[in-house]
Image (cartoon, rainbow, N blue to C red):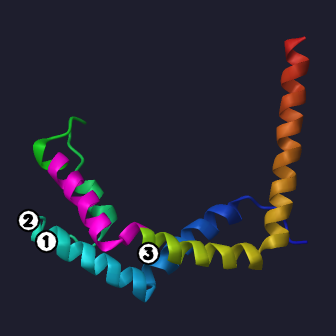
Amino acid sequence: MKEADPVIVAQLAGDSQVQSMKDDKVVEAIAAWSSCMDGKGHTGLADPYKAMDQGVTNDGEPSQESIALAVDDIDCKKQTDLVKIWFGVESAIQDKQIADNRSRLTGIEEQHGKEVAAAREQMAASAR
């Protein structure tokens, strides 16, 4: 069994996202979303994550523009099935990652279970 290093979970999550963004279906869906956003007056948005950043205001209060951006973002995601497509592609990648790393992930799960049990035992002992 490979070492039960929980960092691998974060690495796999990051890798699956990066891989999914290179998939032709996701690339096409993002392009369709970008075109939809362009049609709604939000020009030059090629990355849904950067679009979310544009909606952030300095004072933390939503502006009319940020609200309009968010509403249009949701509408374009629905129209293009971006979330459904991306989720499907990334889920397939993650399923393969899980299969390829099963022993390592099982070791992490077992270690986590032991740590949680030890913490609960410690809390119960402290409460007495």
Residue 103, numbered label: none
The disc labelled 3 sits on which kind of residue? Ile
Mark seen at residue 38:
1
Q: Tell me residue 62's x, y (percent).
A: 20, 39
Examine the rendered structure and indicate whether residue 42 appears above or below residue 114: below
Please give the residue where the numbered disc 2 appears in the rendered image.
Answer: 41
**Rendered location of residue 25, percent (x, y):** 41, 85
Residue 99 position within the rendered picture, expressed as x and y whole percent measured from the top left: 76, 77
Residue sticking out furthest to the bottom: 24
Sequence order check, earlier mark of 2 and 3: 2
Q: Residue at x 12, y 49 (%)?
A: 65
Q: Which residue does the numbered mark 3 point to in the structure image? A: 85
Q: Are marks 1 and 3 in contact (CB under 8 Å)?
A: no
- Report the residue at 86% width, 61% height from top: 107
Cα separation, mark 1 vs mark 3, equals 20 Å
Dots 2 and 1: beta carbons under 8 Å? yes
Look at the numbered disc 1 and give the secondary structure of its residue. helix
Tag 3 or tag 1, which sits nearer the N-term?
1
Residue 119 percent coordinates (x, y): 83, 33
Q: Main secondary structure of the magenta part?
A: helix
Looking at the rendering, the stretch of residues picked out in magenta corresponds to 67-83
Quote the CA–CA distance across marks 2 and 3: 24 Å
**Dot 2 crowding, Cα within 10 Å, few <14, some 14–19, many 20+:** few
Dot 1: within a 10 Å radius of its alpha carbon, few (fewer than 14), some, or many (20 or more) residues? some
For the C terminus, give its image quadrant: top right
- Say which amino acid is labelled 1: Asp
Q: Looking at this rendering, what residue extends furthest in the top direction?
A: 128
Residue in the image at 49% along x and 78% along y: 20
